[in-house]
Image: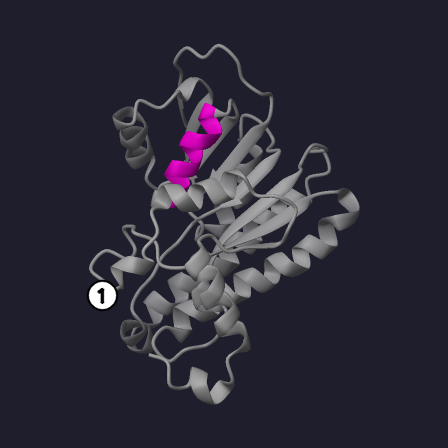
Amino acid sequence: MTVIRSPMSQYTSKTVLVLGANSDVAKEAILLYLRKGYQVIAASRSTAGINAFMAARRAPTDLLTVCYFDATEFEEHERFYQSLPAKPHIVVYAAGFQVTNEQALVDWEGSFRMMQVHYAGAVSIIHLIINDTTNTHLERIIGLSSLSGVRGRKSNFVYGSTKAAFTQYLAGLRQYLFPRKVTVNVIVAGYIRSKMTAGLDLPESLLMEPAFIARAIVNAGTGFEIVPGFKWKLIHQVLKHLPEKLVAKLP
């Protein structure tokens, strides 16, 4: 576990745990949280990637802790959680992995890893967090999901199904945690310019920058579904209500 310190005049006593912290969106969110004065625990398989990014962006890392976390190493989740330097007020789950639908149909390992990273890994670590009765200050859980999980489409239904499962889990978790006054949000994002989409043939006019999605995470309110971007809000509504025979004609 690496702790990076630099001078900072004021900070809040609240802690944010970011899981999957080396994603492009997560790193931008970490920057925003740090600038707002939160203590941030950035957990990822690539601790070197996070450290390099923070150094390159001259991040105010006075209260940044970088530690190793792998969503698929279920047997290590409890040890990881118990070793945290502080119990979180806010949890952001942004771990991601993707293979193409064509590959997923013939490569079980790729399909299974998407299921583990987007759903099983999230459920495993989040259950440990919400069942920790010693953490009385947990106030928010935010999951990064995708519009791919809104409706099944022939071009990406394997990936989309893992995101749909995650979104539905968060929906039920929100109801379960309501009596404890813990807010649960899901960021239902469209196309993001990121490592995961690099090389894909996506319309430039619909690509969103990671920093834009990060602002939606950090500024999440009380509503459940948050769809960043006006164009994607429209697409989200169309996808939800489009008749099945028309959905079948989509790529």
Residue 103 visible within the image: yes
The number of numbered discs placed on residues in the rendered structure image is: 1
User: Between 187 and 134, which is closer to the camera in this rendering?
Assistant: 187
**Quadrant in which residue 204 is drawn:** bottom left
Which residue in the structure is indicated by mark 1? 201
User: Where's residue 136, x and y in %?
Assistant: 72, 33
User: Between 24 and 207, which is closer to the camera in this rendering?
Assistant: 207
Mark 1 burial class by Cα count in 10 Å: few <14, some 14-19, many 20+ = few
For the magenta stretch, what is the residue range?
Answer: 25-35
User: Where's residue 244, x and y in %?
Assistant: 50, 86
The colour mode here is: one colour
Magenta stretch, main secondary structure, is helix
User: Where's residue 80, x and y in %?
Assistant: 51, 38
What's the residue at 45%, 50% (across, down)?
71
The N terminus is located in which quarter? top left
**Magenta includes 178?**
no
Q: Amino acid at mark 1?
A: Asp
Where 46 sits versus 37, above or below? below
